[in-house]
Image: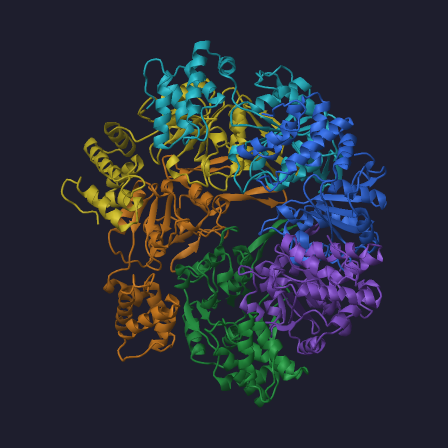
Chain colours: A purple, B green, C orange, D yellow, E cyan, F blue
Amino acid sequence: MPGAQKVSENLSAQIIHDEPFFRAVADEIEIFAAAYAGRLPVMLKGPTGCGKTRFVEHMAWRLKRPLVTVAAHEDLAAADLAGRFLLAPEGTVWHDGPLTAAVRMGAICYLDEIVEARQDTTVVIHPLTDARRSLPLDKKGELVEAHPDFQLTISYNPGYQSAVKDLKESTKQRFVAIEFSYPEPSIEAEIVMREAGVEAPIASGLVDVALRSRNLRGQGLAEGASTRMLIHAAKLLRGGAPLSAALRSAILLPITDEPDLREALGAAIAASLPNGLSLQ
Amino acid sequence: MPGAQKVSENLSAQIIHDEPFFRAVADEIEIFAAAYAGRLPVMLKGPTGCGKTRFVEHMAWRLKRPLVTVAAHEDLAAADLAGRFLLAPEGTVWHDGPLTAAVRMGAICYLDEIVEARQDTTVVIHPLTDARRSLPLDKKGELVEAHPDFQLTISYNPGYQSAVKDLKESTKQRFVAIEFSYPEPSIEAEIVMREAGVEAPIASGLVDVALRSRNLRGQGLAEGASTRMLIHAAKLLRGGAPLSAALRSAILLPITDEPDLREALGAAIAASLPNGLSLQ
Amino acid sequence: MPGAQKVSENLSAQIIHDEPFFRAVADEIEIFAAAYAGRLPVMLKGPTGCGKTRFVEHMAWRLKRPLVTVAAHEDLAAADLAGRFLLAPEGTVWHDGPLTAAVRMGAICYLDEIVEARQDTTVVIHPLTDARRSLPLDKKGELVEAHPDFQLTISYNPGYQSAVKDLKESTKQRFVAIEFSYPEPSIEAEIVMREAGVEAPIASGLVDVALRSRNLRGQGLAEGASTRMLIHAAKLLRGGAPLSAALRSAILLPITDEPDLREALGAAIAASLPNGLSLQ
Amino acid sequence: MPGAQKVSENLSAQIIHDEPFFRAVADEIEIFAAAYAGRLPVMLKGPTGCGKTRFVEHMAWRLKRPLVTVAAHEDLAAADLAGRFLLAPEGTVWHDGPLTAAVRMGAICYLDEIVEARQDTTVVIHPLTDARRSLPLDKKGELVEAHPDFQLTISYNPGYQSAVKDLKESTKQRFVAIEFSYPEPSIEAEIVMREAGVEAPIASGLVDVALRSRNLRGQGLAEGASTRMLIHAAKLLRGGAPLSAALRSAILLPITDEPDLREALGAAIAASLPNGLSLQ
Amino acid sequence: MPGAQKVSENLSAQIIHDEPFFRAVADEIEIFAAAYAGRLPVMLKGPTGCGKTRFVEHMAWRLKRPLVTVAAHEDLAAADLAGRFLLAPEGTVWHDGPLTAAVRMGAICYLDEIVEARQDTTVVIHPLTDARRSLPLDKKGELVEAHPDFQLTISYNPGYQSAVKDLKESTKQRFVAIEFSYPEPSIEAEIVMREAGVEAPIASGLVDVALRSRNLRGQGLAEGASTRMLIHAAKLLRGGAPLSAALRSAILLPITDEPDLREALGAAIAASLPNGLSLQ
Amino acid sequence: MPGAQKVSENLSAQIIHDEPFFRAVADEIEIFAAAYAGRLPVMLKGPTGCGKTRFVEHMAWRLKRPLVTVAAHEDLAAADLAGRFLLAPEGTVWHDGPLTAAVRMGAICYLDEIVEARQDTTVVIHPLTDARRSLPLDKKGELVEAHPDFQLTISYNPGYQSAVKDLKESTKQRFVAIEFSYPEPSIEAEIVMREAGVEAPIASGLVDVALRSRNLRGQGLAEGASTRMLIHAAKLLRGGAPLSAALRSAILLPITDEPDLREALGAAIAASLPNGLSLQ
């Protein structure tokens, strides 16, 4: 990623020097800035591969704040965020986790897909999201008050949550929410050109493929082709793959293994090809 | 939070010097004071974001007691409250947990959403809630008798508990209960003005939005807009966000992802806007 | 608790010097004494808050034995009772758990709500409950023979056990059982007067409330007001709370959150109030 | 237990010097002796409290072998039987578990209710039950060949096992089985006299009570009164308890909490009382 | 076991000097030898107690290879096979597990009932079963290439596997399979004579009993009497037990606890007795 | 495996000097090369035993990159890939896991059957699959940026995944996919000749058997005979096993234990034998 550097050898925070490319779709930049002005925690909602991670990188650059990113998963425990005691020659020594580090230095802490984490992880952020703005390190017996510039951002994909795994109401209500979707065709083509280094006609053709695939949502497909998949296809083309093979490997095969859906999606994609190529 | 300071570098207790802002709705302050006079443990019941945490801070200030707060979660074990042995150069050394610290110093210990914790956590507080007023540290082989000023307070949201996760009868009966709900409109507007720094007409308008959303409870919504959400919207307005965007980000999007409910809630909120703005 | 002192700084056993107040309901004192004469293990059955813990304290005082109390919970493991190796500068060192300590010193060991514990915990007590009267410390490779004065007592609330969590037949049969229920009204009023320091008319009125609430058992209520709840209400009155608020906080709110039951219970309680006060 | 002594301070094996009282019901002593002659592993089947543990003690005395007893439970792991490395000043040091100790010294190892243990525990005994007669200590990298006098005995109560928790066929087939039931009335009365120190008429009356209770098996009762319960009742009588209280505490209350069953059982017991006493 | 010796004090491998008695039923010896010539992994299928373990011992003797046997169970983890770091005075030190030891020395490694193990255990053997013939020790960062003489053998009883616990297709396909069943009557009698030291008529009579019991398979019995059970019965006879008691303890009681099945099986066995003896 | 060597004593990476034999079926080599040119992560889809592992080895040789292979299983945790702290005399010391080692050195990291792993494992690779190309080591507090030559490849068998165990959409979309199936008969025969060292007629006959077995897919068989099974059969033939025994042990017995399916498969295989041999 251009402009990203580590703060120190021993820290997973990024300081982003160069503007990460981001094309706004609506008022997402203004809302985030207003939330940051009031130090309100933010929740980003939206489908996979639509640019949420890039947006946070862009806002960190724009607000001149370090960025600490943690990808949540079902074994992520509170101690993975807050820190833990490790054994050293002189006895046990405390090591700050990435959240504690962000709280102390005044970074933006981005917890990606927080709903995947264990519940103790979601509860540990509660005191950081209200007037207290503090992080209790119970095991260390310390109450860390947040740096004035600290900000907490999480992502949340409503379509993925099941009844057994969802954020608690008492957690959701603590966040201001911003909703994301795929960009306008012309903007999306511009993004593909920029990210994969291909010409405008190729990018436009790929966006056309994406729109056709997204029309199949609700007919069995969970999601259509994402902007990320278009960039993959464009890069395969640049690497020398023929068009049909690039679309098959980057879009058709990753989206579904169900034979009927794959046939329908293949037909939809093939209809947009200039010369009647088949993907099968 | 104004007036909160750590007792020492190594302690998660707060001493609250300045009066935390709290507007009483009913006789909650008197009941808590009477319970404290008899050193009875207290259970606070009520919905998310209605001010339970602030109430405990207020009472700690009023009773001139340090406050130790622990947010419970499903991995919170008894040892996280009581303490544990840690490895040091001279062998294993005992470290008091936050509950033990509060018991020794005579603090108010506030266990937030205790029902989320593991059962050993709820059982460890039993001897502190009856005539014994003691905390056995089985692993250390010590019976800590509570400081005369120690008081135990827990919160409990009845609407959230499922059949598999509820407080045992033998635990519930050990507490005196105080019930909370949202304040009267005029009081709630005063709170929003005070917390977000906005003018009275804006605060009143936001409370009006909240009342409309709360009317939808029972029609599919688990809860309406909380006082906390109103403060969020007011802060977004102060940060420069337009009214419709502030309401959408602070209230509409966090409350529900269900399309029908979102439409109904959006219509209810829009009906209260001065100029027919839409939230979508 | 009057008369309770720790045996030593490092021991969770109590030696009870002053007679703990206990009013016998039936022949429970005689049966316990006969069981102790034969060194038979005892199981106390009965509802929450009816005085089982106090009874064991009374018997320990009467029999002049130290008392070791352990509140069981679902994470209580055999090692929590028997003991474990801890790391010290000279290597691992064995530390007796509370049960082992009681076995060696000849104390009464009271395991409260044993059914909550993990199964290894219930099995570890088997050799203490038959002719062997010994406790094998497998991890230490020691067979501890019980002090001649050692006695084991457990509590068990049949109404709470589910099919998945019950004592094994082979455990139940090892104990002599004593059944507890709430005391006669006059005795219960005497207990309330004594424990909360209120006058006879107030105590009698509260017992009257309790009787009305207990009549609702079987109509949806798991239990009525316990003796402990009456003491709580009396203490709130002494602390300055008005009567209706004391009854609401000490009895009505802790017992149930179900609206219909709460209304029925509130009406039953209000009917016993001198001046038609409402609890809502 | 008469005649039982520890082999050493650091060993949970018993050497039984005096003959433990045991009255054979059928050919159990001969079968066990024949199995021991062929060094075949033995499984004891039968209800709770009928004397299986005492039988093993008797056979250990008769065969002049030390006895190592382990009560299995659902957290009993292979390492609890085989042994484990413990941390000592000179590094990790291996400590034999009770099974390994029995294998080396040629003791009888009695695993009580083995089906309760974790599966790794049942598998670890396989090589001890066939021609190999060896115990692999995988973690230590040692293959311990059994002492020629070593014998393995387990107990198993078929009535208690559920579908999810039963011995594997490949485990059951490795054992020779002996079935136990309650002794003949005259023998059972003799046992009660001997164990509790009461006169013959009292013992006979108690056995009469037991027979009546066992007739209720299959009408809702899992089991009737065991020999152990009769001994308890006799000891309570010796300790000064009246007859009806002794029967209630030792038999009626421990067997069932179901009101209908308790009433039927109480009536059956009362019918055998000399003077129409009630147990309620 | 005749001829079995440990390679060293600290190793669980056997070198088998004397031929273990084994009577081949079909071409199992030739197939195993051909598989070993191609270093193909082998899976032994067949019921309990039919001689699979003895066959592997025989082949290890025949091929002059050391034998390492591991009995799998549901808590067997990859580290139990591969090895782990242990704490020593000079820090953590790696200890090879039994599989790694076998891989290095060129032994036959026999994993008994592998399907019982945790999945990581089955995956860890994959690279040993294809052209790679290597064992990655991820935690140690070492790739151990197998000794040219190393061979992997597993056992698998298809009748026992449930839907939730079965070998993955991608594991099964990696093995060449050999199927086992009980031997012909004359061979089985010879085995019983040899293993238990009884005369031919007794052995033949016991085999006759086994055949009758195996005819009941499919009528409720999971399996009939195994060869092992016949050897048990013969040994009890040698130890002095009467015929009916020997058959009851060695065959009838271990096979089933279901009353109807036990009666049917008892009748089938009794029909083969010379003098109309009953087993009940 | 020809040409495979360890990079160092302490590293599980292979440098492949000699070309691993691989016969391409379609454009898989070109697509992988194009993906590698754009440093896109690759997912290999296809049935067991069709040559996915060999393909990755071939591409590593072709692209002159070291290869790190990890076989995933349900207990594989993120720390097994990323690394962990180990205790050494000077305190805890960090050890890179195989993924971190591959990221630093610029190897191809092949995660076989990634869907089997714990979810934290799949999430830890996310930042390596987008523009970030970095691996955060949260416990060490280090953000490792990938070597420019690093490439990530995973395998995924769609037919095996259940509803509860499948890759998340947000993971699948991050990979370019290549689909594998069994090769053309002439190519498959060439592979068998080459791998097992048998003559052409034998290899062709075995491929004929495989084709017949694969025709039974969908009639109850999950899969037909794989190329690996043909190589097994050919090796058994070379080791001296007769044809029918080789086919039975290498193909018939491993594929199914269901009697009807086994009979149908046996008949299909027997039909292709030159002389009407039976497999039973």
Question: Residue C127, position in %: x, y?
Answer: 41, 37
Seen in the picture, residue C20 relative to A23 is either above or below; the reply is: above
Front one among D34 and E19:
E19
* Figure quadrant of residue A192: bottom right
Q: In this figure, what is the number of numbered marks?
A: 0
Residue A278 sits above or below residue E19 on the image:
below
Q: Quadrant of the N terminus of chain C?
A: bottom left
Work out whether E82 lies above or below F127: above
Q: Residue at x 37, y 70 (%)?
A: C259
Q: Is residue F225 in view?
A: no
Q: Position of residue C42 (x, y in %)?
A: 33, 46
* Left or right of C233, for residue D273: left
Is residue A106 among what the camera can see?
A: yes
Image point (83%, 41%), residue name: F15
Using residue A98 as the reference point, say whether residue B229 is left or right of it.
Answer: left
Which one is in front, E256 or F226?
Answer: F226
In this rendering, position of residue B268 left or right of residue D270:
right
Q: Position of residue D12 (x, y in %)?
A: 48, 32
Q: Quadrant of the C terminus of chain C?
A: bottom left
Query: Which residue ends up furthest to the left in the rendered image?
Result: D275
Rendering quarter of residue F256: top right
In the image, farthest residue toward the front: A276
- Estimate the x, y position of residue B221 in percent, counting from the top left: 50, 72
